[in-house]
Amino acid sequence: MTIVITNDDGPLDTLHSQYIAPFVNNYLANFDLKSKKFNEKLLICVPSEQKSWISKAHFANKQITLQFLYSSSQQPYDNEIKIGPFLKPLPMNLHKGIQPTKYTPSNTLLETEFSKFPATICGKTFNSLEEIKSFFDIEWVLVNGTPATATDIGIHHLLDPKTDEKVNNLVSGPNVGRNVSRPYITSSGTIGATMESYISSGGLINGIGLSWAYFDNFKNVSNSSLDSTSEWSWKVILNLMQDGMGLTAEIYSVNVPILKEGLSKDTKVVAAPIQKNTWKTLYEIKDETDSITFNWNPDFDGNKQKMIQGHLNGDQDDGSLIEGKNITVTPLLANFAVSLPASDFGKELVFTEVTNKNHIYLDNEVPYVNEIWKEVFNGYKDKYKIEINGKLDPSEIEKNGIAFQIAEYEDLLHQEGSQLTNYFQNSYTFRKSLIRKHYLLKTIQYFVAKNPNSPLKTSFPESYHLELDYAEFLDDSLDENWELRQELEQGNKSQWWIMKPSMSDKGQGIRLFQSIDQLQAIFDKFDEDEDGEGYNAIIINQLRHFIIQKYLMNPLLLDDNRKFHIRCYVLAVGDLEVFVFDRMLCLFSENVYESPINFNEDLHDSKFLAKHLTNTCQQQEKDESIVTEIDKLFENNDQRDHIKSQIHTIVSDLFKAAKQDNFNFQAANNAYEIFGLDFLVDSDYGVQLLECNSYPDFKQTGDSLSGLIKELFTNVVKAAILPVFGVESEKNEISNMTKVLELKTERASW
């Protein structure tokens, strides 16, 4: 789909048409085929020279000729960096957001024009044709006619009808100056072009005329002001293209103030009729004796004073409202008639925040989780037109609008979904650098090597990676980890170690040990149990990767001297924002803690392990006391807040570290994910990261804490799901959630 851009001021020019280039480049900087809004290519087709004050005119019987001009997205504010015009298009490497015409580019013309290198063009030195082709990447089609003619040509004659590409929108502008009040708007070539879009397309294209109203005769503003006005202009335009912002019209006239200080977030967008100003004569007699001649002399100041006075009077029309630095939208019929009832004059318009069809597909294996999701979505489905479905049929995605799937990892459309602009899922596809324990170790080691002051250096236990298929290979694996071997051979009686399978979950296979002989005995025991049926047992050759960590010998003990770990839910959104849910859980061991220092019996004994392992999945007798919200445990709020502050900092650096591993962690704009991060606290209230889990077991909170999970899911809806449906306002209403990182991939610069 294509948006035609035209105007009445002609191609980019420092004197006459200084706004169109930054306006176009602002769109191109946001262009992304996967974007909800900036996903249509631009086809720029403008008059070859300024054609203002011409309304909806055509030059009857005039032969129309095209020329082609090229500018650079790398120079968005310089209106003199351009080459051409040429009679045929050139074979340029056009920006991915620019729609090429159907006409075949001429290599011969390019090679003839630029035949000697190095070549200096517009003050820049180029050493080859490829450099020129890549630098001048925006194509301008110039029409030797009026704005209405450029509209006709752009809509009907520049794209190949055999392809799927077609024009579905037209933007005329931005006009240099305001198109408000009856004298200006009826004369405007900018508005005339939009009329032609509706009339020429058979009523299919509701053209939008855009004008930038400057003040105090100050036309040339800073780049930041141009960006601000561009961003607001596109925000209004894209909402009008979506559903008219609640207005009904054949065409629209939009006026946006361009201010030195830029537009504020509180700028209002209001519906406005046309101010009923009238002209005096536009001309004055020139005192000549040999001919009767008139000079052009409109009474601009008189018209401006009427706008100022209308603003002071509180009038609700376009001239008065633009003078008050509002953005005005005037819905028109394609004959200068306002399509707006008087009751709507001056009404503030609300940006559309939803699409017609928002589908949630809930298909979790755990009914407990599904029911909480349904309860949360039921609070929003009517307000934001959300339809809740079960299992997703991929064939229904394209015709059913936006599809947001919340399901098990294996059921998500990882490959085909990444190619769709309207499919979203509840998990990143690639995140091994966080959720596999040996990958997590490497992620942290690489990051700390480059960032030695990172809190990850001291807040992650000293750890080693072992890889073996059978117990008999332990000695070889330790030879490859000589630092670990040295540590274990020292025989430090006051230090124990913990062994964890890298790719298991729910505490499976975790053992404590102190020496190489004990570790060998643990693996031998696993090998003897070929079926993995013993207590908390594993089959070694099905896992292969193991992490050895120093055991925390001075854990903080609470609740009758029991050990605990903190489960913290972390939300990662898109590409990417990271939020920490501050209602953290403390998961306690089943038995009272005893130091392992003097223990010399069976390391597989369930009672021994129950004193040290806090995974609720491994506990024989579960009661409400094993999971408690952290805020209810600490009478000293300073201690609790100190713990949470450390967790915020650790999580921030952890996701920074993951983001640097572009192979094993790939944040994606069509996904979010809830991770369950586990932390230990020592007796000095220092925090250590244990691991990061995908698809955490929300049911482990128990029914008494289902409200906590409901609040978490509600925050996920507000921060990650509703914005996909165009609803940004709810993001400001999240509760007990702290954003700790925003590290989105930077787009290529202009």
Image (spheres, rainbow, N blue to C red):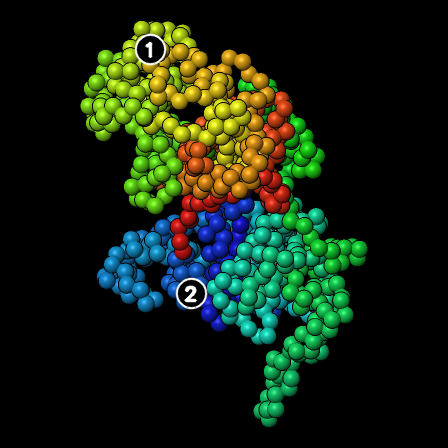
Residue lying at the far bottom in this picture: please name it. 289
Question: Left or right of 206: which side holds 219?
Answer: left
Determine the secondary structure under disc 2: loop
Vertical relation: 476 (above or below) 195 = above
Residue assigned mark 2:
78
Please state the horizontal and vertical placement of residue 125, each as a whole percent of the image: 28, 63
Quarter of the view holding residue 374: top right
Quarter of the view holding residue 132: bottom left
Q: CA distance from mark 1 to mark 2?
A: 70 Å
Frontmost residue, 682 versus 129: 682
Residue 377 visible in image: yes
Please state the horizontal and vertical placement of residue 284, each as a whole percent of the image: 65, 84
Residue lying at the far right in this picture: please name it. 343
Query: Which residue lies at the image location 45% right of the left edge and 17% below the top edge?
Result: 610
Vertical relation: 164 (above or below) 346 = above
Looking at the rendered structure, the kind of residue marked 1 is Phe
Question: Left or right of 676: which side holds 437?
Answer: left
Vertical relation: 457 (above or below) 397 = below
Looking at the rendered structure, the kind of residue marked 2 is Asp
